[in-house]
Image: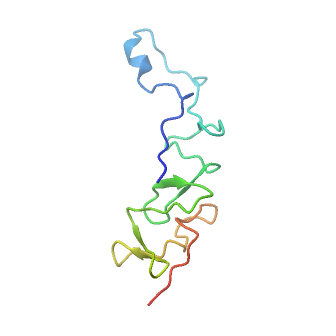
Amino acid sequence: MNYFPSPPSSPSPFEHLDDPDYVATDNEPSIVCGSCNKALGADWFCSNCHKKCSTCSRILALNTDDYCTRCWVYVPSQNTFVPRQKYLPSPTSSTTSSSSSTCSTATHHSH
């Protein structure tokens, strides 16, 4: 599993706490993706570089076979993913908007 550290070019969200003259302005530097420099929103999610688990919205690597280990277990003998809990949907069926990616590209077989 890949882990994504805080982008190095992002400002510290707390650096202003030591400055008694700090005044919030609209032209503050925004938090940017460390891979593509896209300005990020409050959730720090970059759709250019990452995907979200369709079940829990955990951020995963894009363009990999990365899948959410919180929600799914891969069974190599069956070449399939099984939900950690029976009520979860398949990792290959999107439960979010059509623009978001799913957890994995592998096929889930129903029994």
Q: Position of residue 3 (x, y in %)?
A: 47, 46
Q: Is residue 31 shown above or below 79? A: above
Residue 96 locus on image (x, y percent): 54, 65
Which residue is at a point 45% across and 55% down the rendered structure image? 58
Which residue is nearer to you in this view: 94 or 2? 2
**Residue toward you, 26 or 39:** 39
The single residue placed furthest to the left in the displayed view is 85
Image mark count = 0
The image shows residue 66, relative to residue 15, as above or below, that is below
On the rendered image, what quadrant is the C terminus found in?
A: bottom left
x and y, in percent, of residue 94 in the image = 55, 70
Name which residue lies at 46% across and 54% down. 1
Horizontal side of 90 relative to 32 (left or right) equals: left
Name, please, the residue furthest toward the front.
Answer: 77
x and y percent of residue 102 in the render? 55, 65
Residue in the foreground of this view, choosing between 18 and 90: 90
Question: Residue 74 versus residue 36: which sits nearer the camera?
Answer: 74
Name the residue rendered at 49%, 71% in the picture.
91
Quarter of the image for residue 86 reads bottom left
11 up-or-down from 84: above or below: above
Q: Residue furthest top?
A: 21
Q: What residue do we see at 60% from left, 55% from top?
A: 62
